[in-house]
Image (cartoon, grey):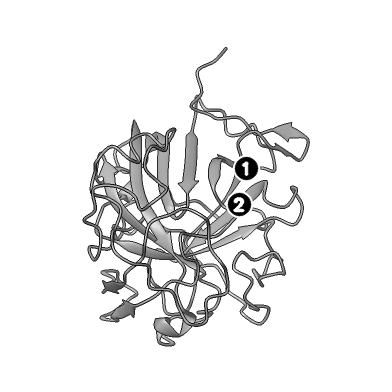
């Protein structure tokens, strides 16, 4: 996920980013106000555009029920970017999770950013086994409340989820090099137990997922590198038709003040959002 300015108020919640009742995960976080950072993230500033936990990421295929899936650009091609083992589910799990997915078996992580200091984290369980039910599908980044923007000739980005696995594709000019590049990043996410942030990040209830990027091609594009993880917020809009557009905001710096450095909205491909059809920006023109 590339860095962008906050721009308009995110449609998931009020402009103060107080989480509303539509938060994915069902937890009561109405008191968790989270402010955005005063400075937008810079591509590649800390290598935390997305992340890869090294623990438990050595499988060669998905768990039961996931073999034979299609449409995920190599999701089941024998690569080793999805963990194996037995899901460790938090005792306070708030969601039944999706019907298919890959297990989360834990993540030991020390962020390497200017703001994170030497804080260490040990995530032992997930609150959404196999990922959040209802998130699965393919989404396109859109701007200005217009599902047809940006023009794919200028910029295009998609996320595709099956269970808790994802593929993120970005195609645009990388500000670090001034050249247009297409990057494909793969990984998975889990839903952390808030107490496992150890009060080291403000608004710990608000960060309802941790993205774990395990493969990036080409590595380093848009500051995305394997080996890094990011706490993020997933939430559906209350305006675009529940489940039709997904908001994502991430604390790439693991800033203890609980700021985010990216915030984007994505519409579900095939859905109509604000009167416009959300189309795949990478689809060949008819």
Q: Residue 267, which numbered label? A: 1
- The answer to whether any part of residue 42 appears in the image is no
Q: Residue 246, which numbered label? A: 2
x and y, in percent, of residue 33 in the image = 62, 77
Say above or below: 271 vs 97: above
Label 1: how many Cα within 10 Å (few below 14, some 14–19, many 20+): many
- The answer to whether any part of residue 204 appears in the image is yes
Q: Nearer the viewer, residue 126 or 157?
A: 126
Tell me what residue is drawn at x 38 percent, y 73 percent. Answer: 88
Question: 89 left or right of 105?
Answer: right
Q: Quadrant of residue 268?
A: top right
Mark 2 vs mark 1, CA separation in Å: 6 Å
Proximity of marks 2 and 1: CB atoms separated by less than 8 Å: yes
Q: Nearer the viewer, residue 234 or 48?
A: 234
Tell me what residue is drawn at x 55 percent, y 73 percent. Answer: 206
Q: Secondary structure at mark 2?
A: strand
Say above or below: 125 vs 235: below
x and y, in percent, of residue 246 in the image = 61, 51
Label 2: how many Cα within 10 Å (few below 14, some 14–19, many 20+): many
Count of numbered tags: 2
Tell me what residue is drawn at x 67 percent, y 46 percent. Answer: 244
Q: Nearer the viewer, residue 179 or 123?
A: 123
Q: Secondary structure at mark 1?
A: strand
């Amino acid at each position: 996920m590339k860095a962008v300015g906050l721009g308009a108020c995110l449609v998931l919640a009020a402009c103060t980013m107080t989480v509303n009742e539509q938060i994915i995960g069902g937890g009561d976080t109405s008191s968790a106000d989270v402010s955005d950072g005063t400075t937008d993230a810079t591509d590649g500033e800390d290598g935390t555009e997305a992340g890869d936990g090294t623990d438990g990421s050595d499988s060669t295929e998905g768990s039961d029920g996931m073999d034979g899936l299609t449409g995920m650009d190599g999701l089941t091609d024998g690569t080793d970017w999805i963990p194996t083992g037995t899901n460790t589910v938090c005792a306070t799990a708030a969601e039944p999770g999706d019907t298919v997915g890959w297990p989360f078996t834990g993540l030991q992580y020390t962020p390497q950013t200017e703001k994170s200091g030497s804080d260490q984290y040990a995530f032992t369980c997930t609150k959404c086994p196999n990922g959040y039910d209802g998130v699965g599908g393919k989404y396109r980044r859109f701007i200005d409340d217009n599902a047809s923007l940006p023009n794919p000739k200028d910029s295009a980005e998609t996320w595709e989820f099956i269970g808790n696995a994802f593929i993120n594709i970005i195609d645009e000019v990388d500000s670090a090099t001034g050249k247009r590049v297409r990057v494909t990043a793969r990984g998975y996410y889990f839903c952390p137990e808030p107490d496992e942030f150890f009060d080291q990040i403000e608004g710990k209830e608000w960060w309802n997922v941790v993205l774990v990027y395990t493969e990036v091609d080409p590595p380093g594009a848009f500051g995305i590198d394997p080996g890094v993880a990011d706490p993020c917020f997933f939430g559906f809009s209350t305006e675009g038709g529940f489940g039709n557009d997904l908001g994502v905001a991430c604390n790439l710096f693991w800033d203890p003040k609980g700021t985010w450095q990216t915030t984007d909205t994505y519409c579900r491909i095939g859905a109509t959002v604000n009167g416009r059809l959300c189309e795949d920006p990478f689809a060949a023109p008819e």
